[in-house]
Image (spheres, rainbow, N blue to C red):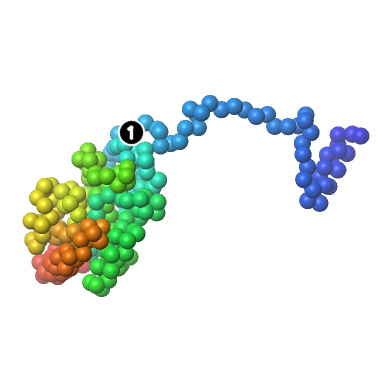
């Protein structure tokens, strides 16, 4: 029997949905690949931080965050957490660092802490998709949800600074100790910084507790509500409205 006839029969059987097995002479060759050549990207070497961040527009900035390998946090992340919300926002909410749920979904403030934040915003007549933008100081999750290290905050600081420049928000709400430290360059406890309107690059900034903290300390929810009211009052000040140009 000729090879051509054999191939025609094989094609006919294939059309009938019958599974065909290659003859020994046609089996694919199995190639052994050294394990080093298929090592996950997480083991790749660290790289210098991106340059020109201060000139990047939104898409380029998001790509720079996604590709960043400037510190060890890149080796354990599943996703970078750039930020989410309205890029014409009046409100900028700044948290500390992604947790496990944020790392999985690539979005800040999800899970129970995110639900509480949504309820806090709802009490102000806001939501995370309109007039609100949410970001973290760190764009990658620290292992085991540990506290951010100073050098990690320093590596991520230019990304957050550029986000503020692009947003030009009318009010910043700094939630949690590490957000406060990064934005205000202060080691004072939150309790001493609350109740005052601070400034970050000219933008009014109000300090409050992180929702994850409030879930463990229910009595401080009333203080957090007072902070939200202070932020709303600062946003509604005539001088702030005029400066925003919105």
Q: In this view, does 121 lie above or below 160?
A: below
As drawn, is 10 to the left or to the right of 214?
A: right
Q: Which residue is drawn at 34% across and 38% down?
A: 69
Q: In which quarter of the image is residue 126?
A: bottom left
Kindly identify which residue carries mark 1. 47
Position of 35 relative to 225 (above/below): above
Comparing 153 with 149, the one in front is 149
Give coordinates of residue 103: x percent, y percent: 36, 50
**Residue 241 showing in the rendered view:** no
Q: Which residue is drawn at 70% across and 32% down?
A: 28
Q: Quadrant of residue 72?
A: top left
Q: Residue at x 78, y 42 (%)?
A: 20
Q: Nearer the viewer, residue 93 or 187?
A: 187
Residue 65 place in picture, x, y as percent: 33, 45
The image quadrant where one finds the C terminus is: bottom left
Q: Where is residue 2 in the image (x, y as percent from the top left)?
A: 89, 34
Q: Can residue 174 be seen in this view?
A: yes
Above-or-below relation of 161 to 74? below
């Amino acid at each position: 029997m000729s090879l051509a006839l054999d191939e025609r029969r094989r094609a006919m059987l294939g059309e009938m949905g019958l599974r065909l097995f290659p003859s020994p002479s046609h089996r694919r060759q199995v190639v052994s690949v050294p394990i080093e050549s298929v090592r996950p990207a997480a083991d790749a070497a660290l790289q210098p931080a991106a340059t020109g961040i201060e000139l990047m527009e939104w898409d380029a900035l998001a790509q720079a965050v996604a590709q960043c390998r400037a510190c060890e946090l890149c080796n354990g992340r599943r996703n970078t957490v750039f930020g989410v919300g309205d890029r014409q926002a009046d409100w900028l909410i700044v948290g500390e660092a992604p947790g496990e749920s944020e790392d999985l979904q690539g979005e800040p403030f999800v899970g129970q802490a995110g639900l509480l934040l949504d309820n806090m915003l709802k009490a102000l007549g806001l939501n995370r998709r309109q007039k609100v933008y949410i970001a973290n100081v760190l764009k990658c999750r620290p292992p085991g949800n540990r506290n951010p290290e100073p050098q990690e905050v320093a590596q991520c600081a230019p990304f957050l600074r550029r986000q503020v420049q692009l947003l030009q928000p009318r009010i910043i709400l700094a939630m949690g100790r590490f957000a406060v430290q990064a934005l205000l360059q202060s080691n004072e406890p939150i309790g001493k910084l609350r109740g005052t309107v601070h400034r970050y690059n000219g933008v009014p900034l109000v300090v409050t507790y992180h929702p994850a903290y409030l879930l463990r300390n229910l009595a401080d929810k009333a203080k957090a509500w007072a902070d939200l009211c202070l932020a709303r009052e600062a946003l509604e000040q005539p001088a702030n409205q005029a400066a925003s140009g919105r």
